[in-house]
Image (tube, rainbow, N blue to C red):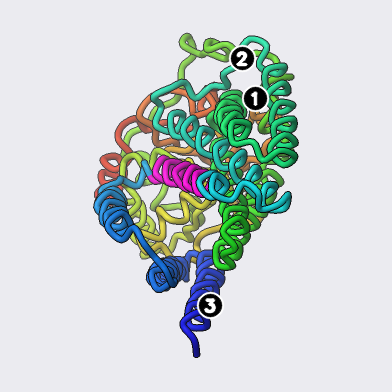
Amino acid sequence: MTRSEWIQLGYLVAAVCFILALKGLSSPKTARYGNFIGAGGAILAVVVTCFYPNMSNWPLIIGSVVLGTAIGVPAARAVPMTAIPQMVAAFNGVGGAAAALVAVADFRTHSNAGWAVALAVVFSTAVGFISFTGSCITFGKLQEIMTTRPVLVPGGRFISFGLLAALVVLVGVVIGTGSVPALAALAVVGLIFGVMLVLPVGGADMAIVISLLNSFTGLAVAASGAVLRNTLLIVAGTLVGASGALLTHLMSQAMGRSIGNIMFGAFTSKAVTAGAGAASDRSVRTGTVDDIAILLAYSRKVVVVPGYGLAVAQAQHTVRELADLLESKGVEVSYAIHPVAGRMPGHMNVLLAEANVPYEQLKEMDEVNPEFARTDVVVVVGANDVVNPAAREDASSPIYGMPILDVDAAQHVVFLKRSMRPGFAGIENELLFGDKTTMLFGDAKDTLTKLVGAVKSA
C-alpha cells in the first residue's frame, strides 16, 4: 500500500471511532467508553495527518499540540462539575473559530478555486464565527458574569434582520468575486450576529442553545473539510452537526416549544420585571431534619428530583447514600430526570453516573410523571424551573408551555434549597408556597448528610 492509502485507511478507522463514540455516548452506561473511543479516534487522526507528504511548519505544529495539551488537560481535570456546561460552551466556541480561521486561511491562497470551494468557505466562516461569539455569550450567562435574563437591545429585531441580510449579500459577493476583503467583512458580521442571536435567550434555555451552537460548529468543521478536501473532517463535522441538530430538536420537543420560539420568543413576549411574582411578604412551611427523616423512612415510594443545586453542592454521592439507606428499609427510590435539568443536555445523568447511581433508577419525564400521584415523598434537590407549575398555569410566564415534572401531584414535596432565590429563569415558583411543600434550607450536601444520620436512627 502507498503512503496515501495508509493515510486514508487511518482516516477511515478514525471515522469509525467517531461513529462508535456517538453510539457509546447515547447511554450513561457506555458513555465513558464512548468518550475514550472518540478521544482515541481524534489522536489517531492527528497522528495520521502528520504523515502527509510535504508536511512543513513542524515547530508550529508541535508547539500547538503541546500548548493545547498543556491548556486542555489541566482545564478539563480541574473544572468542577458545576462548570462543565461553561467548559463545553468555551471549547465549542474555540472549535467554531478554528474551523472558520482554517477556511479563511485556505481561501487566501486558493481564492480562484471555484464557486463550490467559495461556498464552503463562506459557510464555514459565517457559521464558525457565529458559533464562536454565541458560545462566548452562552459562557457568560452560564458563569453568571452577565445577566441570565433575555437581553433585548433597542431595535434588536431589526438589527438582527439587517445583519442576516448583510450576510446574504456578502456571501454572494465572495462567491461571485472571490474578494478577500468581502470575506473579512463576512467574518465581522458573523461575529456580531452570533452575539445578537444569543443575547435575547433566557438562562432557562441555555441547554438548548449549547446544543444548537454545537451543531453549528460541527457544520462549520464539515465545510472546512470540504475546503481542505479532507474526508475525515467532513465525516466528523457532519456527525457532530447532525447529532447536535437532532438533540436540539428532541430537547425543544421535550420543552413543548419550537426552536424559533426559544431563540426569538423574547422579541414577542411581554417583559417580565425582576420583581414579578415576588413573594417577600409570603411565608413558607419549614421543617426539621428529624421530621423529614421520619417521613422518608416510613414512606413506600420516594422520588428524588436532582437539579443544578445538587451539582453546586457536589452532593451526588450523599444523595446516593440516602437512597441506599432508604432502600435498605424497604422504600422504593427512583430519580426523576428532566431533559433540561442543569445547564446542559444530560447534566444530571452525568452527575448521578459519577455517584454510580443504577441506570435503572433514572426515570425520564414521560415515564415518571404518571408515578407522582402514587409517590409518598418527592425530594427536590436544587431544581426549580423544571418543577414550576407556572409552566402549566401562567400564560405570561417565560417558561409557559414547557413540560415539567409534576411533583405537585405527590403526597408530600420536600425542597432542599439554600434560599428563596428564584431559579435560572429568574421567576418565582408557586410550588414553594404549596400546602404539600416543606422547605429545608441550607447547603444540599450538609442537609443530605444530616438526613442520612437521622434516617439511620429513625
- Based on the picture, tell me whether residue 316 belongs to the magenta stretch: no
- Based on the picture, tell me whether residue 90 belongs to the magenta stretch: yes
Which residue is pictured at 44% across the width and 25% down the height? 285
Q: Position of residue 274 (x, y in %)?
A: 53, 12
Q: Position of residue 188 (x, y in %)?
A: 56, 28
Q: Amino acid at mark 2?
A: Val
- Residue under numbered circle 2: 272
Give the structural element (helix, strand or loop) at label 1.
Answer: loop
Q: Is residue 185 visible?
A: yes
Q: Amino acid at mark 1?
A: Pro
Q: Is residue 396 left or right of residue 6?
A: right
- Residue sitting nearer the eye, 169 or 419: 169
Q: Main secondary structure of the magenta part?
A: helix
Which residue is pictured at 57% across the width and 47% down the height? 107
Few, some or many residues within 10 Å of mark 1 (<14, 14–19, 20+):
many
- Residue under numbered circle 3: 8
Mark 1 or mark 2, earlier in chain: 2
Corner quadrant of residue 36 = bottom left
Q: Which residues are magenta?
A: 84-102
Mark 3 or mark 1, earlier in chain: 3
| CA distance for labels 3 and 1 | 50 Å
Q: Amino acid at mark 3?
A: Gln
Q: Are marks 1 and 2 in contact (CB under 8 Å)?
A: yes
190 vs 253: above or below? above
- Residue under numbered circle 1: 398
Give the structural element (helix, strand or loop) at label 3.
Answer: helix
Give the structural element (helix, strand or loop) at label 2.
Answer: loop
Which residue is pictured at 34% across the width and 58% down the height? 57
| CA distance for labels 2 and 3 | 56 Å
| CA distance for labels 1 and 2 | 8 Å
Mark 2 or mark 3, earlier in chain: 3
